[in-house]
Amino acid sequence: QVQLVESGGGLAQPGGALRLSCAASGLSFDVYTMAWYRQAPAKQRELVAVIESGGSTDYADSVKGRFTISRENARNMVFLQMNNLKPEDTAVYYCYAKFASLSYWGQGTQVTVSS
């Protein structure tokens, strides 16, 4: 059974930082493309950052230069370092795994940016 479990969300002040973690189990992690999505209230879910199995990364324009995605294949984990947070980053953040026709979602973790 595949599980993706996010952690690290919470409340941060504008300009602050948070680090999200996603622990994966039940899959051959190193072959999967991993990504972070987010969904704000009344908005569609959007891609935040993606990291391929080979390590190449891509980001939404809104987070470039502020967020960094990374992975540790030995621990089956993917991370999202979020710096210089803005109120518009407030959302539920989801971990996502994809390989060929297989894809999985985590349950999400809430990030709130507010003073």
Image: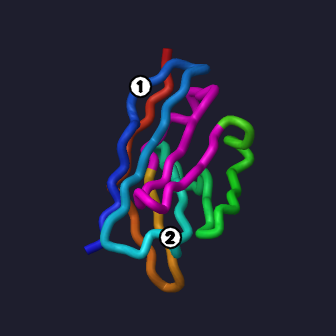
Q: Is residue 22 above or below residue 96?
A: above
Instruction: Find the magenta span and give its range.
Output: 67-93
Residue for point 32% across, 66% down: 25
Q: How busy is the neighbourhood of tag 1: few (under 14 within 10 Å), some, or many (20 plus)?
A: some
Name the one closer to the observer, 58 or 111. 58
Closer to the eye: label 2 or 1: 2
In the image as oriented, which residue stretches furthest toward the bottom? 101
In the image as oriented, which residue stretches furthest toward the front? 74
Residue for point 70% across, 57% down: 58
Check residue 30 in the rendering and tell me which mark sits there, or answer none. 2
Check residue 20 in the rendering and tell me which mark sits there, or answer none. none
Q: Is residue 88 magenta?
A: yes
Q: Is residue 62 above or below residue 112?
A: below
Q: How busy is the neighbourhood of tag 2: few (under 14 within 10 Å), some, or many (20 plus)?
A: some
Tell me the element at label 1. Answer: strand
Residue for point 31% across, 72% down: 26
Residue designated by label 1: 11
Name the one closer to the observer, 28 or 106. 28
**Amino acid on which disc 2 is placed:** Asp
Tell me the element at label 2. Answer: helix
Q: Position of residue 83 (x, y in %)?
A: 61, 30
Q: Is residue 84 above or below residue 58?
A: above
